[in-house]
C-alpha cells in the first residue's frame, strides 16, 4: 500500500514539478483518487515536504489516510500560511522551529496529536497567527490522543491577531491578561452572531474533568460565559500591568467601557430569560453583570488611575462570594 509521500513523489517527480505546487490537502487527494475509482487509502507516516518550496497550505487529516502522519518536515516552505495537521500522531513540534518565515503563518491546527511536553512559547515566533489550536478535544482523548503543552499566555503577548484558540486538556494555566484585544473582539463578534451560544468556541479551554491545569483558565472565564472582553474589563489592574495600551486608559474611560459592557450583558440576559432551559446561561450572565458593576463601583470611588491593593483585595473577595452561588448542576463546559 502506497504512502502519501510516495504518492506525492510519483505525481510530482521532479524538483520543478514540486515547486509549482501551492497546496497539499489530504481530503482533496482522497476525493481525486476516489473519482478515479481508487478506494485504497494512502498511509501517513513520515512526510517530507521540503522540496515543495512554494507551498502555501498544508492540510493533513487522519480521516483521509489509512494511518496517521507521525513526522513532518517543512524547512524550506517559506510561503506557508496555513498548516492543519490535527488528529494525527505527531509527537513533536520541533519542525516549526525550522520554518524560515514564521510571520507568514496565519492558521496552525495541531489539536488531537500526541505532542510530548512542550512550552507554548514555541509559538511566539508566529506573530500573525489568527487561529491557533493545540489542545486535545474529548474525542481525541477517547482515541488515546494527548498533547502535553504547558506554559503561560504571557509568551503569546505579541500574537496580536489571534481570533480563535484551543488549549483543551493542556497545562496552560495562566496569563489571560496577555491575550490580545483581537481575541476579545473576535469573541464579541461570535457572541453577537451566534445569539445564545457561549464565547467558549473562540477560547476552548476545558480540562474534560481531568487534572489538566487549563482548568484554571476555564474557571476564570466560565463566570463571564467565556467573554474575554468582559474578563479584561473586570481586571483593570492586571490589564494595565500587562499591556501598555491599557495603562493609558483613565478610570473615567474604563468606567465608560464598563457601562457599555454592562448594557450589553443586560440585553443578553433579557434574551436568555425569554428562552426555556437557559438557566446556566442566565446564571453566567448575571455573574458577569454583577462583577462588572462591582468593578465600576470601586473604580468610581477611586480618585487614582491605579486601584489600591486594599480595593483590589475587597473587590476580589466580593467576586469570589458571587461565584460561590451554586450553578445549576447540568454542566457542559
Image: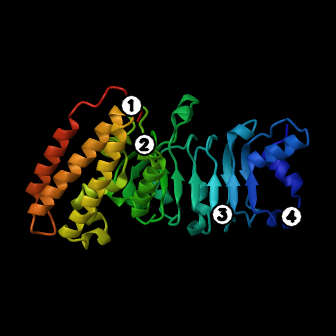
* Residue 54 x %, y %: 74, 67
Mark sitting earlier along the chain (2/4): 4
Image quadrant assignment for residue 82 = bottom right
User: Which residue bears the numbered disc 2?
Assistant: 196
- In the rendered view of the protein, which quadrant contains the C terminus? top left
Question: Would residue 263 appear left or right of 146 to someone viewing this image?
Answer: left
**Are there few (<14), some (14-19), or many (20+) residues within 10 Å of tag 4?**
few
In the structure shown, which secondary structural element does the residue marked by tag 2 occupy? loop
Q: What residue does disc 4 label?
A: 17
Distance from Cα at disc 2 to Cα at disc 4:
50 Å
Residue position marked by numbered label 1 in the rendering? 276
Q: Earlier in the sequence, mark 2 or mark 1?
A: 2
The furthest residue to the front:
274
* Residue located beneath label 3 in the image: 80
Residue 44 location (% of width, % of height): 74, 42
Rendered location of residue 279, percent (x, y): 33, 32
Residue that extends furthest to the right in the rendered view of this protein: 36
Tell me the element at label 4.
helix
Name the mark nearer the viewer: 3 or 1. Answer: 1
Q: Residue at x 43, y 62 (%)?
A: 182
* Few, some or many residues within 10 Å of mark 3 (<14, 14–19, 20+): many
Quadrant of res 101 = bottom right
Q: Is residue 167 toward the left or the right of residue 10 in the image?
A: left
Q: CA distance from mark 3 to mark 4?
A: 18 Å
**Circles 4 and 1 in contact, beta carbons < 8 Å:** no
Q: Is residue 68 visible?
A: no
Q: CA distance from mark 2 to mark 1?
A: 12 Å
Earlier-in-chain disc, 3 versus 1: 3
Q: Please tell me which residue lies in front, 240 or 97.
A: 240
The quadrant of the image that shows the N terminus is top right
Amino acid at each position: 500500500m502506497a504512502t502519501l509521500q510516495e504518492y506525492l513523489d510519483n505525481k510530482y517527480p521532479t524538483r520543478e514539478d514540486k515547486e509549482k505546487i501551492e497546496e497539499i490537502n489530504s481530503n482533496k487527494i482522497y476525493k481525486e483518487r476516489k473519482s478515479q475509482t481508487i478506494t485504497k487509502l494512502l498511509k501517513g507516516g513520515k512526510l517530507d515536504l521540503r522540496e515543495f518550496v512554494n507551498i502555501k497550505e498544508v492540510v493533513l487529516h487522519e480521516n483521509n489516510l489509512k494511518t496517521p502522519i507521525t513526522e513532518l518536515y517543512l524547512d524550506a516552505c517559506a510561503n506557508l500560511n496555513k498548516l492543519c495537521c490535527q488528529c494525527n500522531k505527531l509527537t513533536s513540534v520541533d519542525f516549526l522551529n525550522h520554518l524560515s518565515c514564521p510571520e507568514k503563518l496565519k492558521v496552525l491546527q495541531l489539536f488531537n496529536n500526541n505532542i510530548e511536553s512542550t512550552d507554548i512559547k514555541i509559538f511566539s515566533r508566529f506573530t500573525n497567527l489568527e487561529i491557533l489550536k493545540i489542545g486535545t478535544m474529548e474525542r481525541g482523548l477517547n482515541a488515546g490522543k494527548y498533547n502535553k503543552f504547558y506554559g503561560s499566555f504571557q509568551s503569546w503577548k505579541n500574537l496580536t491577531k489571534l481570533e480563535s484558540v484551543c488549549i483543551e486538556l493542556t497545562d496552560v494555566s495562566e496569563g489571560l491578561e496577555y491575550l490580545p484585544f483581537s481575541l476579545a473582539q473576535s469573541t464579541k463578534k461570535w457572541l453577537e452572531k451566534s445569539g445564545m451560544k457561549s464565547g467558549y468556541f473562540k477560547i476552548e479551554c476545558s480540562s474534560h474533568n481531568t487534572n489538566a491545569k487549563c482548568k484554571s483558565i476555564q474557571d476564570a472565564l466560565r463566570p463571564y460565559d467565556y467573554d474575554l472582553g468582559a474578563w479584561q474589563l473586570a481586571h483593570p489592574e492586571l490589564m494595565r500591568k500587562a499591556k501598555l495600551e491599557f495603562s493609558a486608559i483613565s478610570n473615567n474611560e474604563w468606567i465608560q467601557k464598563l457601562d457599555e459592557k454592562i448594557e450589553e450583558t443586560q440585553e443578553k440576559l433579557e434574551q436568555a430569560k425569554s428562552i426555556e432551559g437557559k438557566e446556566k446561561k442566565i446564571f453566567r450572565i448575571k455573574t458577569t453583570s454583577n462583577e462588572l458593576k462591582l468593578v465600576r463601583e470601586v473604580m468610581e470611588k477611586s480618585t487614582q488611575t491605579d486601584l489600591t491593593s486594599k480595593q483590589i483585595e475587597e473587590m476580589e473577595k466580593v467576586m469570589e462570594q458571587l461565584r460561590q452561588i451554586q450553578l445549576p448542576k447540568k454542566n457542559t463546559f
